[in-house]
Image: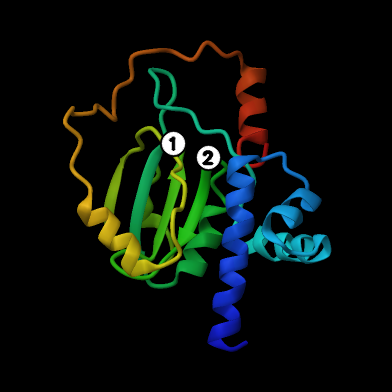
Amino acid sequence: MTQTLRGKRMERYYEIYKQIWENPLISKSEIGENTGLNRKTVARYLDEMDSTVIHGPAISLNPALNYQEYAYFLEVDNPRSAFEDLKEFPSVHSVTCAFGDWSLSFISEERINVEELKGFKKCILQEIKSATTTSKVTTLDWDESMKTMHSMHPPQKKSSLKEKAFIIPWQDWEWALYREFRHNV
């Protein structure tokens, strides 16, 4: 696929994404009307986006006295091999392979001895995960995004991301329900 076609497709993905961000329950026909795309084209693009761009709604809990998650950023020889190792840990989720300072990141509900993973080289960061928010993507252009980030002012008020002031009053069956459906509600 040529660079021009790939760019055009990403722009169409982005138009569909914006429609879903505004109204998660929007129909394919409405997306087609709002974007000028055929309903079948919208359906095809959504199928393509499902595995690469858009992921279903997820539930995320803020840290609490009785619930913490741990974030890990690691450098490993073979991210694929380490990824397979992590499948053995039921508390691990949100595994991502990357390029750059770290090659593997993941979230876990338990502390894990990462030095036991196949090909472990170095732990970049291992911390209690703070509250999670998902911001809206405002542009596809990298340079424009960087310009926007650099123009922002730091917040005036300090935030406390690791605050754990409450207990989640759930029974075992409620925790099981959360764990079953949190990644695709």
- Compared with 156, 114 (above or below) is below
Measuring from the top left, give residue 131's x and y in whole percent: 38, 32
The residue lying at 37 percent from left, 44 percent from top is 71
Q: Which amino acid does label 2 sit on?
A: Ser
Tell me if residue 122 can be seen: no
Determine which residue is flagged by label 1.
110
Q: Quadrant of residue 105?
A: bottom left
Give coordinates of residue 90: x percent, y percent.
Answer: 57, 42
Quarter in which the C terminus is drawn: top right
Classify mark 1: helix, strand or loop: loop
Along the line of sight, the residue nearer the viewer: 1 or 56: 1
- Residue 154 on image: x %, y %: 18, 41
> Is residue 41 visible to us here?
yes
Is 174 positioned to the left or the right of 157 in the image?
right
**Which residue position is annotated with label 2?**
91
- Quadrant location of residue 63? top left
Residue 126 location in percent, x, y?
30, 46
